[in-house]
Image: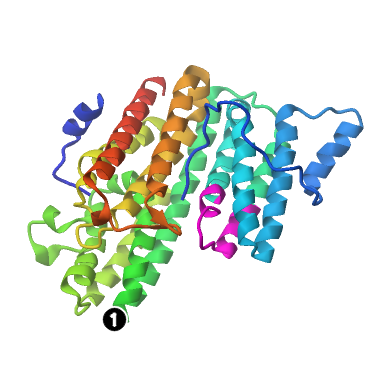
Amino acid sequence: MNRNIKLTGLLLATGLALSACGNSNNEGEPSKTAQATAPATASATSAASGEAAGNALTPIQEETIKLQEETKKLQEAIQKQDTAEVKSLGKSINDIWLAYENSVRQSFPLEYTEVEKYEMPIFSASAYDKIDFAALGTTAEKLQTALDNLLNAKETTGSTSELLTKAVANYKKYVEEQADQLVIHTKTFVEAVKAGDAEKAMLEYPQARVFFENIEPIAESFEDLDPRIDARLADVEDENEWTGFHRIEKALWLDRSLEGMEVYADQLVKDTEELQAKVRTLELEAPAMVAGAMELLNEAAISKITGEEEIYSHTDLVDFAANVDGSKNVYLAIIPALNEKNPDLANQLDKQFQLLEQTLRGHQTDGIYVSYDKLTTEQIREISDQISQLSQLMSQTASIL
């Protein structure tokens, strides 16, 4: 992170923080695959029975059953490891969701967030030439659970403030999950470092970084802890006091030696565990979450875009994607307020997240981001412009919270 950029400059710059959001401005009906011949899920069957008994299904329930059936076919294709079928169904599932996601977002904002969390990663992952069937199967199972909850949900009747409180609580769970995964993946990374296995450490480094970058605004609220984990060499006055991810990054990619890194590796585990513990005591509020997301996006568009964050490993695209994903989860948390006060802004944010994530996916090969130094000036400018636009849209949400 760039400690040399002042928040004032960031605010002036914007007028003030494994996957894309669904397109909220569909032009015509998206293509759909044929209806599933496989049995529907238990809940879908139950809902259909209710219809036969005289309780007509709502349009949202009908589409949700259709999506459950398609997801069931995906699960069967995953079990067979049928790559071609998985690719086809990944697109079909996304098409079905796009056709009615706007209605879900308005009537069931909390359930919408859960479906979006798992549907979009399926769409992204199923497009890879090399598919991780185990991981995709886990995500598909979680999507079925989210769809089951949506199918049986009652239309929201609570006040916006009550819904927002619940949504922020859900975001808190997301932050805690990311912190937990940060510790797990950091330990794997550190094991490779301490074993002197540079090749494995290089592979594990970006895997651990994802979870830190997803919640970077939260980490930055702990001013003493954040620099210990994420400071760059340019951020410290005395290199002998430099610790954290980037200290080891330099050893791996520049020095080409892990000698003496054990002490930094052990300290990194302790620091991420401390962050994990502090996250659980944190009380979050929507305005602060939005401010953190805006600052993060500003920093990405103005500072990180230069490649200064991952100056040795050039894994900057991993950071950008994680920053965007973290900001998207803030957006999902404030949807209840957007629904009431500015639904058009919600549509704009939805489309901008989709556009940016589509652009970032274009720089992947089988889900792996290319080295940042391989991008052209025009490609970097495109990413910067889209992040800036997203930040400007996020800034407009501040007035409604």
The picture places residue 265, in percent across and down from the top left corner, at 28, 71
Direction from residue 229 to residue 355 in the image, left or right: right
Residue depicted at 76% across the width and 27% down the height: 58
Above/below status of 38 relative to 156: below
Residue depicted at 22% across the width and 69% down the height: 253
Quarter of the view holding residue 32:
top right
Above/below status of 238 relative to 98: below
Residue depicted at 13% across the width and 64% down the height: 241
The picture places residue 235, in percent across and down from the top left corner, at 14, 53
State whether residue 277 appears in this view: no
Q: What range of the chain is rendered magenta?
A: 122-141
Q: Is residue 127 magenta?
A: yes
Q: Main secondary structure of the magenta part?
A: helix
Quarter of the view holding residue 305:
top left
State whether residue 118 appears in this view: yes
Question: Dot 1, crowdedness within 10 Å: few (<14), some or many (≥20)?
Answer: some
> What residue is pinned by disc 1?
196
The picture places residue 383, in percent across and down from the top left corner, at 30, 41
Q: Is residue 250 magenta?
A: no
Q: Amino acid at mark 1?
A: Gly
Q: Secondary structure at mark 1?
A: loop
Residue depicted at 44% across the width and 58% down the height: 180
Direction from residue 368 to residue 228 in the image, left or right: left
Above/below status of 136 relative to 42: below
